[in-house]
Image (cartoon, rainbow, N blue to C red):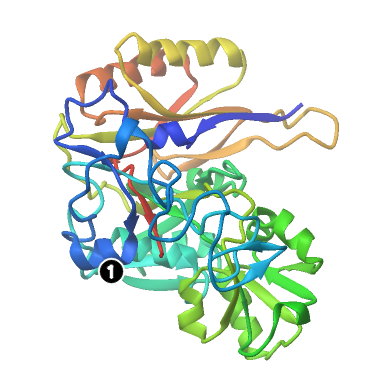
């Protein structure tokens, strides 16, 4: 029987760990709009942060439930539109705030050490895609290369058509449902950077179209799933397409007057459409983590004491629980924090509809040409610390003694900031 269990991106993991402050020059809680970070920050980093609010609570559209810059908290009185009987900013759905004004900025390193000028980043989707915004937030000076699929984006880097590829790998709402980790493992690229983007969905339509005239909504299947409750209340049909930006492009090119699309707020300006509703997502906390990949060797040069993260995959063929406990022991005995741990058990020989094939991993250490190998049991691990840190290196060496296969996917600067497109 195949099953997946994981620990990834809960809210508390996006907040500073008080046990790991020795490498950080500053730590604060604040909202970082991506556009403001690029305009006022240093090389795409967020500008200087304000002190955290009282009692260590995050500011969510205001302080301690009081009226904030964007109106009241918890679905109270707002302006410009009514959806489902609740007042909201520009037609909010579900009474949610339009976005969570929360991020964590850690001093030193991270996104923006270089602005990416001259780099070509391969992204999946049409203009207005979330992957493109994530790439431009991580590397404001980069040029983007649009690709039809994520596999095409990775192939562009491998053949030299791009310097980086960006992949969404997990979200707070869907975990790793995109399965882009599986795609990452099939290629020999290395992780060079991470970026966390707050995903804010809008309902867009042709100019002049009213919400009551919409009979169908198109978007990427994941976006439709993220907005399921809101769409059910609106009573519309749903039609999946390749990506959110592609849905907007289809909407405009075909002048579909009975159809709306779910996409990012930036797509409104790019395609000249009306916004029927902001904040369409069912859950207010909707963050997607993206990884930027490059050809080896890694372009990232980190000091041994840098505030870094090392990603790896550990594969084995049996005794899942015992291997898991040994992996945990290898890190805990050296006081190394884990920021991600996901366990994949795919028994390809198991009977039943739920069985999944083994995970295919490219063995880049094999003699001769890299070889794809199949493993039924895999652990994805992100640990705090640089790969050259003696403690991390010793932990990996210990794991290599009992695991069938270990591959370090990359070592890169930690960036826990959650960037917003607003």
Using the rendered image of the protein, determine whether residue 241 is visible from the camera's viewpoint: no
Q: Quadrant of residue 216?
A: bottom right
Q: Please identify the quadrant where the N terminus is shown.
A: top right
* Residue at left offset 21%, top offset 48%: 49
300 displayed left or right of 208: left
Q: Is residue 324 above or below residue 189?
A: above
* Residue at left offset 26%, top offset 47%: 297
99 displayed left or right of 353: left
Residue matched to label 1: 142
338 displayed left or right of 345: left
Number of on-image labels = 1
Q: Is residue 255 above or below residue 14?
A: below
Q: Position of residue 401 (x, y in %)?
A: 40, 13
Residue closest to the eye, 25 or 120 = 25
Q: Position of residue 225 (x, y in %)?
A: 69, 54
Q: Please identify the quadrant where the C terminus is shown.
A: bottom left
Q: Position of residue 102 (x, y in %)?
A: 38, 47
* Residue at left offset 31%, top offset 19%: 336
Residue closest to the eye, 331 or 23 = 23
* Residue at left offset 22%, top offset 70%: 118
Q: Position of residue 376 (x, y in %)?
A: 63, 28
């Amino acid at each position: 029987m195949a099953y997946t269990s994981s620990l990834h991106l809960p809210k508390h993991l996006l907040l500073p760990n008080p046990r790991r402050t020795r490498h950080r020059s500053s730590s604060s809680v604040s909202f970082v709009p991506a556009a403001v970070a690029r305009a006022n920050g240093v090389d795409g980093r967020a500008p200087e942060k304000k002190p955290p609010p009282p009692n260590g609570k995050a500011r969510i559209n205001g302080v301690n439930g009081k009226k904030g810059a964007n109106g009241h908290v918890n679905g109270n009185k707002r302006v410009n539109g009514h959806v489902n009987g609740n007042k909201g900013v520009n037609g909010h759905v579900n009474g949610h705030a339009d976005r969570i004004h929360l991020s964590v900025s850690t001093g030193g390193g991270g996104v923006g050490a270089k602005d990416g000028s001259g780099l070509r980043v391969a992204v999946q989707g049409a203009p207005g895609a979330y992957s493109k915004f994530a790439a431009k937030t991580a590397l404001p000076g980069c040029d983007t290369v649009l690709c039809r699929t994520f596999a095409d984006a990775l192939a562009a880097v491998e053949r030299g058509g791009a310097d980086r590829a960006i992949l969404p790998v997990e979200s707070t709402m869907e975990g790793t449902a995109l399965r882009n980790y599986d795609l990452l493992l099939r290629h020999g690229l290395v992780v060079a950077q991470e970026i966390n983007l707050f995903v804010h969905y809008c309902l867009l339509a042709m100019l002049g179209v009213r919400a009551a005239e919409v009979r169908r909504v198109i978007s990427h299947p994941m976006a439709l799933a993220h907005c399921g409750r809101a769409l059910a209340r609106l009573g519309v049909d749903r039609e999946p397409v390749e990506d959110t930006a592609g849905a907007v492009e289809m909407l405009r090119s075909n002048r579909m007057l009975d159809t709306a699309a779910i996409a990012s707020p930036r797509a409104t300006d790019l395609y000249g459409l009306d916004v029927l509703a902001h904040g369409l997502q069912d859950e207010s906390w909707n963050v997607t983590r993206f990884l930027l990949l490059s050809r080896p060797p890694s372009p990232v040069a980190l000091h041994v004491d840098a505030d870094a993260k090392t990603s790896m995959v550990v594969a084995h063929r049996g005794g899942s629980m015992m291997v898991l406990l040994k992996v945990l022991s290898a890190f805990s005995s050296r006081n190394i924090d884990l920021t991600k741990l996901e366990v994949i058990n795919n028994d390809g020989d198991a009977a039943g509809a739920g069985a999944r094939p083994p995970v295919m991993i490219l063995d880049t250490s094999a003699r001769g040409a890299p070889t794809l190998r199949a493993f039924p049991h895999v652990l994805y691990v992100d640990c705090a610390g640089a790969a050259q840190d003696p403690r991390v290196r010793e932990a990996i060496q210990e794991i290599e003694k009992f695991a069938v296969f270990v591959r370090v996917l990359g070592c890169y600067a930690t960036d826990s900031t959650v960037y917003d497109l607003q």
